[in-house]
């Protein structure tokens, strides 16, 4: 598992940003991917980012929730974060509906080292 944060934690965090869950199927898939031993940590993070930023499971606060998850990932894995670059990538993934996991993974690796 790439992060200790679970689905219930993410729902609580999003609620703090004023959002409500609209659909949880993509979140369920992303959290199922967290248990795949063959996937690297950044790829697992990419699945979670895609579920939040592209599939918009929350009524509000999707980008803020994704940023929180990315920062939690960085803290748990003792990585440095380029905050400006992370924000740039989060907005780009959401606006451009980037669905390719490799592309999202590359962007996360670029911002979180």
Image (cartoon, rainbow, N blue to C red):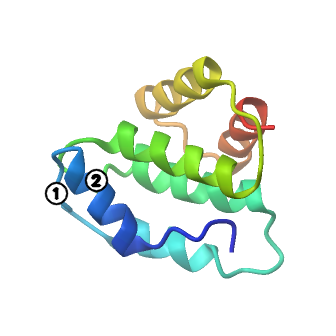
- Can the viewer see residue 54 in this picture? no
Residue under the image location 74 percent in, 47 percent down: 102
Residue that carries the numbered disc 2 in the rendered image: 14
As helix, strand or loop, the secondary structure at mark 1 comes to loop
Which is closer to the viewer, label 1 or label 2? 2
What is the quadrant of the C terminus in the image? top right
> Which type of secondary structure does the marked residue at label 2 adopt?
helix
> Which residue lies at the image location 72% right of the left edge and 45% below the top edge?
105
Disc 1 vs disc 2: Cβ atoms closer than 8 Å?
Answer: yes
| Disc 2 residue crowd, few under 14, some 14–19, many 20+, Cα 10 Å | many
Query: Which residue is at a point 41% across and 26% down the rendered structure image?
Result: 95
Asked if residue 82 lies left or right of residue 69, the reply is right
Q: Is residue 64 left or right of residue 89?
A: left
Answer with mark 1 or mark 2, whichever residue precedes in sequence: 2
For residue 5, the mark is none
Q: On the image, which quarter does residue 13 sit in?
A: bottom left
Residue at numbered disc 1:
20
Q: Quadrant of residue 54?
A: top left
Provide residue 89's location: percent of width, then percent of height: 58, 27
Quadrant location, the N terminus: bottom right
Instruction: Point out residue 9 in the picture as x, y percentages from the top left corner.
Output: 38, 68
* Apparent side of residue 10 relative to residue 48 in the rendered image (left or right): left
- At a point 20% along the width and 43% down the height, the residue shown is 60
Residue 49: x %, y % from top left: 53, 49
Is residue 14 placed above or below 94 in the rendered structure? below
**Is residue 59 among what the camera can see?**
yes
Q: Sort mark 1 into few (<14), some (14-19) or many (20+) by Cα contacts within 10 Å.
A: some
| Front in this rendered view, residue 39 or 17 | 17
């Amino acid at each position: 598992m790439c992060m200790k944060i679970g689905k219930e934690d993410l729902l609580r965090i999003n609620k703090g940003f004023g959002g409500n869950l609209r659909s949880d199927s993509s979140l369920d898939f992303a959290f199922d991917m967290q248990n795949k031993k063959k996937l690297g940590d950044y790829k697992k993070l990419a699945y979670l980012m895609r579920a939040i930023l592209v599939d918009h499971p929350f009524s509000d606060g999707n980008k803020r929730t994704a940023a929180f998850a990315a920062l939690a990932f960085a803290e748990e894995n003792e990585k440095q974060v380029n905050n400006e670059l992370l924000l740039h990538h989060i907005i780009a993934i959401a606006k451009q509906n980037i669905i390719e996991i490799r592309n999202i993974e590359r962007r996360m690796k670029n911002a979180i080292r």
